[in-house]
Image (spheres, grey):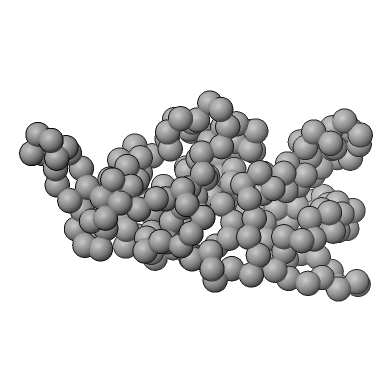
Amino acid sequence: MPSTILEIANAIKNLNDSKWHCHIQYFVSKIGISPEVADSFIRQIEKGGRGMRSNGTWHANPSPYENPIDLTSPNDNILGLRYSIVGDGARSVHEITFAEPSPIVVGHPGTYFQIGKLSKQKKLITVSIQREIVQYIIGTHRELLKHYPKTAESRQETWRSWIDDGASANHYQQIHLPYIVTYFKDVWDTKFKIGVPLTPSILHYDILSRISRIRR
């Protein structure tokens, strides 16, 4: 388990670059630390060290992290990490936690991370749009519930089957998936062709596990 600034930073750099945002719980599970350690690490990276200069307790971070880094800036940084705190109830990176993976996470305040250099990505996406995609996938989006309640109910019943290749997977893939892909056509790096079967990998259902900690 990484514990020092350099160990945690190296663990982050070993993660795959992605334009998708991941929930704090998914993030810490990937690098093997707790949300509390992640919170302390982020504060230390943003300050460039720990302690106070005024009372002589200041200790600068080891190179190359000795200078403060704004991890909320959309610009690339040497760590390859950015985070966004979403929702009025989330005031720190580990305040909202869930013991188990759950789609409920999507509707709650929380902290989301982007990993890697954004300048390498073809298209970028906001946390709010990604959360909407997940809500459309699992059938809990407010527009679905308001205007298409039967469709919403069907998705709520069948999306897990699609992820797990269960009995309703084909129904979800043929009826629901094409609509979702088309509705959010501007976010995918892949260009879709008429007649080409849509698969979970094409939709990048990794966004589900990233944003709601759903296990694949």
The quadrant where residue 107 appears = top right
Horizontal side of residue 34 vs 120, given as left or right: left
View extreme (top): residue:
89
Q: Is residue 143 visible?
A: yes
Residue 149 vs residue 167, the one in the foreground? 149
View extreme (left): residue:
56
How many marks are shown on the rendered structure?
0
* Residue at x 61%, y 47% (from the top left corner): 127
View extreme (front): residue:
54
* Residue at x 86%, y 73% (from the top left corner): 193
Residue 9 vs residue 202, the one in the foreground? 9
Percent x, y for residue 100?
A: 52, 36
The quadrant where residue 150 appears = top right
* Residue at x 76%, y 36% (from the top left corner): 140
* Residue at x 70%, y 68% (from the top left corner): 189
Q: Is residue 215 visible?
A: no
Horizontal side of residue 148 vs 139, given as left or right: right
Percent x, y for residue 86?
A: 56, 37
Horizontal side of residue 5 vs 129, given as left or right: left
Percent x, y for residue 108?
A: 60, 31
